[in-house]
């Protein structure tokens, strides 16, 4: 009798163990299947950068509102070939009517400053005064400069104007040092933010876009950067200016003004966009390795927003000719 009870007990224990094992496997499988595999670019989560106070990022939820498409597609724009890469993004319809080398690794030149601007707007206080240091000006010969001198005092907000309108590398270096604590820490955060917006084909080594073999992006990632930057009203306000005057206090205490002229030929009216297309602004870039580059935010005749990107163009003339082709296509 006792033997039968022992056997029965052992059988019940084994059955219970099997039931627990099966239940756990079922739960794990359902949990794995039920977990959505999505990439959330920005959230409303608070972040702290360079020992500063916490600030909330815009609640953009890009993963549900992105344009998606193939590497090469659409429109039959056979003229856009060779070393240049580009794409047209319809923001309203979340589509990519045209793409050529969408995911190919390219050099961004000063389009890099879109990400520099995003970090300044997220983590900086635009009314803070920044003093220009020698390290901000120690850049390669021929570098695009806004025109600051050592000891100049200027607000972070006005440095942002110099970055986006004049594409001043001196302004970008000073702002990066001020916001990040150092340019190196700022660049580290740039790469973190690139991942956050889904720009996984990019890696930056500086806040300016000056050439480095390890400083690269893709046309699609440039779209992600401009799409992120346009969420800030301050960014949209700045990029529309063809010129702007910023006040500066020199080292000796005297006041002065620095004139900023846009590097965008659409804004200066040196180049006219196609009929019924309104150029809202964007970011230019040029180096010998990157070629002539331009990322634009525009509006077509029907009020639809578009982002158009071109990189690697051999000349400024070809850049604007090809860009006009893309802009004209927004009304097709």
Image (cartoon, rainbow, N blue to C red):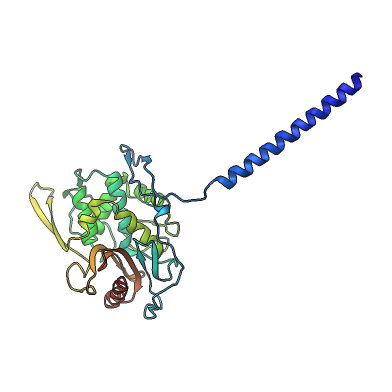
**317 and 39: which is toward the camera:** 39
Q: Is residue 122 visible?
A: yes
Q: Which residue is drawn at 15% across and 62% down?
A: 243
Q: Is residue 190 above or below residue 214?
A: above
Q: x, y percentage for residue 227?
A: 33, 57
Name, please, the residue furthest toward the left.
Answer: 254
Q: Is residue 169 above or below residue 269?
A: above
Q: Left or right of 322: which side holds 133?
A: left
Q: Left or right of 220: which side holds 145?
A: left
Q: Residue at x 30, y 58 (%)?
A: 113
Image quarter (top left, top right, bottom left or bottom right) of the C terminus: bottom left
Count of marks overlaid on the render? 0
Image quarter (top left, top right, bottom left or bottom right) of the N terminus: top right
Question: To which quarter of the image does residue 289 belong?
Answer: bottom left
Q: x, y percentage for residue 311?
A: 35, 69
Question: To which quarter of the image does residue 326 belong?
Answer: bottom left
**52 and 306: which is toward the camera:** 306
Name, please, the residue furthest toward the top.
Answer: 2
Q: In this view, does 263 lie above or below 149?
A: below
Q: Is residue 135 visible?
A: no
**157 and 209: which is toward the camera:** 157
Name, please, the residue furthest toward the front.
Answer: 302
Q: x, y percentage for residue 23?
A: 68, 37
Q: Left or right of 14: which side holds 221?
A: left
Q: x, y percentage for residue 325?
A: 31, 76
**285 and 152: which is toward the camera:** 285
């Amino acid at each position: 009798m006792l033997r039968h009870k022992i056997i029965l007990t052992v059988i019940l224990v084994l059955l219970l163990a099997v039931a627990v094992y099966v239940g756990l496997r079922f739960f794990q499988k359902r949990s794995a299947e039920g977990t959505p595999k999505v990439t959330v670019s920005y959230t409303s989560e608070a972040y702290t950068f360079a020992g500063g106070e916490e600030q909330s990022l815009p609640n953009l939820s890009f993963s549900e509102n992105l344009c998606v498409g193939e590497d090469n597609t659409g429109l039959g724009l056979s003229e856009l070939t060779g070393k240049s890469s580009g794409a047209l993004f319809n923001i309203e319809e979340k589509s990519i009517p045209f793409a050529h080398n969408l995911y190919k690794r390219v050099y961004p030149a000063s389009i890099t400053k879109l990400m520099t601007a995003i970090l300044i707007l997220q983590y900086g206080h635009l009314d803070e005064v920044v003093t220009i240091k020698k390290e901000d000006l120690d850049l390669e010969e021929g570098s695009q400069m806004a025109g600051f001198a050592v000891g100049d005092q200027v607000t972070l907000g006005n440095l942002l104007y110099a970055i986006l309108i004049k594409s001043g590398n001196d302004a970008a270096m000073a702002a990066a040092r001020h916001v990040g604590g150092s340019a190196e820490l700022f660049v580290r955060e740039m790469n973190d933010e690139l991942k956050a917006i889904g720009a996984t084909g990019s890696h930056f080594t500086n806040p300016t876009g000056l050439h480095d073999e390890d400083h690269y992006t893709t046309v699609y990632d440039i779209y992600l950067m401009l799409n992120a930057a346009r969420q800030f009203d301050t960014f949209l306000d700045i990029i529309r200016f063809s010129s702007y005057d910023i006040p500066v206090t020199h080292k000796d205490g005297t006041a002065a003004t620095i004139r900023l002229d846009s590097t965008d030929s659409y804004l200066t009216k040196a180049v006219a966009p196609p009929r019924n297309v309104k150029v809202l602004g964007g970011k230019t870039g040029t180096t010998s390795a990157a070629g002539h580059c331009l990322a634009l935010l525009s509006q077509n005749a029907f009020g639809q927003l578009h982002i158009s990107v071109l990189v690697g163009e051999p000349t400024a003339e070809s850049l604007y000719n090809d860009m006009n082709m893309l802009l004209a296509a927004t009304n097709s």
